[in-house]
Amino acid sequence: MARMHSDGRGSSGSSRPVDPDTSWVIYDEDEVRELVTNLRGEDLEPSGIGRVLRDRYGVPDVQEITGDTVSEMIDQEFPEDLRSLMKKAVRIDGHLDDNPEDKSSERELSLVESRIRRLVDYYRGEEIPEDWTYNIEKARLVVE
């Protein structure tokens, strides 16, 4: 999604090992679930929780150990990528309230809102309600 409105050609991503061996991890399923709920109290997004578990606790893959992803355990109202785009749109809209002549920010807001609408169509029915539509006021409520 990041290169939807730019000239970038992208880059190849890394892939995980075919058969990850997590037998060396010192935490069992219940301990990992408890760590996830404790880290959720620190107001981290699912990707941030995964990074902390990997770097601080040595848990390479939460889904391998628990059977659920961090997002499934946290049970957020909206997917993380959609929430981050809404945060960005709210931040740009606040900037435009203070700087109404900033045309490049108006263009950026238009592009971000386009990505949001595309993601809403993608997640509609499964992750978000069928009748939910995006507008900046709803985004403010979701972000705050």
Image (cartoon, rainbow, N blue to C red):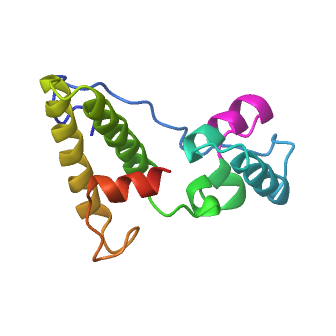
Q: Is residue 77 left or right of residue 116?
A: right
Measured from the top left, where is residue 140 in percent x and y?
40, 52
Vertical position of residue 34 compared to residue 25: above or below: below
The total of numbered circles placed on residues is 0
Q: Is residue 92 left or right of residue 76?
A: left
Q: Residue 6 sits in which quadrant?
A: top left
Residue, x 73% and y 40% (percent of image)? 59
Measured from the top left, where is residue 38 in percent x and y?
78, 49
Q: Is residue 45 located in the magenta-colored stretch of the structure? A: no
Measured from the top left, where is residue 53 in percent x and y?
72, 38
Q: Which SS does the magenta portion mostly show?
A: helix
Q: Is residue 52 located in the magenta-colored stretch of the structure? A: yes
Vertical position of residue 93 compared to residue 124: above or below: above
Q: Closest to the observer: 110 or 28?
A: 110
Residue 7 in view, yes or no: no
Residue, x 42% and y 49% (percent of image)? 83
Residue, x 14% and y 32% (percent of image)? 107
Rendered-image quadrant of the N terminus: top left
Q: Residue 110 sits in which quadrant?
A: top left
What span is in magenta? 51-61
Residue 127 in view, yes or no: yes
